Amino acid sequence: MNPVPHCGISCPTTWVPLPIEPSDDVASWSKSTAAELWERSKAAGYDLDRRTLRKDLRDWAKDSRGREPFYAFAFYPDGLDTALGLLEVDLINPDELAPPQISRTDLPAGPAVRIRQNFVAEGSPRRGPGILLQTVTYGILPTGSESAVVLLMSWTAPGLDEEMEAAANRIVQTVTWTLEVSSDDVSLPSA
């Protein structure tokens, strides 16, 4: 029997799920999502530039798609037409996970390593040259799994450390993991 992994996560509405499947229509998604975020911000008393918002959504989705994570979310608080952070969940081999630099913790999905790190990253055309990239990474080894689930939250805006770390610490509590066995993988004894 080959177990099929299923990973789940729940984020607040300010964390917008990004379309990461190759079949997803990013252009249509960015247009409709920009309209939704514009309406949400308008109701909160803010006026956003829809074109800037649509382009930012599209850029973040394309950026995450290149890494092929299970899930990707961009942080869009009301009143901002550019994302303040990125959250991705992926699966890696535990041997690829660096030794814990900060702490170990137990989460509902299983034991985890939490790494908080700041470093200077090479800039990309949309983010500019040489940026301070701040990250919180959780490597979770779900009970019964041979692979680790990785949740990575990163941000470049200064002054958000406490808020972003607190958000990562809350969201990681919602990660779920189940293994399902498909009926095709079950072999019955011959009679």
Image (spheres, grey):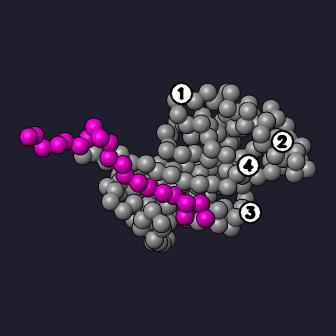
* Crowd rating for badge 2 (residues with CA inside 10 Å; few <14, some 14–19, many 20+): some
Do the residues bearing badges 1 and 2 touch, measured as CB atoms within 8 Å? no
Mark closest to the chain's N terminus, 2 or 3: 2
What x and y, as percent, mark residue 164? Answer: 66, 61
Q: Which mark is residue 76?
A: 4
Residue plotted at (59% across, 60% down): 171
Separation of residues labelled 1 and 2 (CA atoms): 27 Å
Query: Which stretch is magenta?
Result: 170-191
* Crowd rating for badge 3 (residues with CA inside 10 Å; few <14, some 14–19, many 20+): few
- Foreground mark, 2 or 4? 2
Mark closest to the chain's N terminus, 2 or 4: 2
Amino acid type, label 2: Glu
Is 40 in the magenta?
A: no
Residue plotted at (51% across, 52% down): 8
Do the residues bearing badges 3 and 4 touch, measured as CB atoms within 8 Å? no
Secondary structure found at label 1? loop
Separation of residues labelled 3 and 1 (CA atoms): 37 Å
Residue picked out by circle 1: 23
- Foreground mark, 2 or 3? 2
Q: Which mark is residue 159?
A: 3
Q: Which mark is residue 39?
A: 2
Q: Nearer the viewer, residue 175 or 74?
A: 175
- Foreground mark, 3 or 4? 4
Mark closest to the chain's N terminus, 1 or 2: 1
Separation of residues labelled 3 and 4 (CA atoms): 16 Å
Q: Is residue 34 above or below residue 97?
A: above
What x and y, as percent, mark residue 55? Answer: 73, 33
Q: Is residue 20 above or below residue 95?
A: above
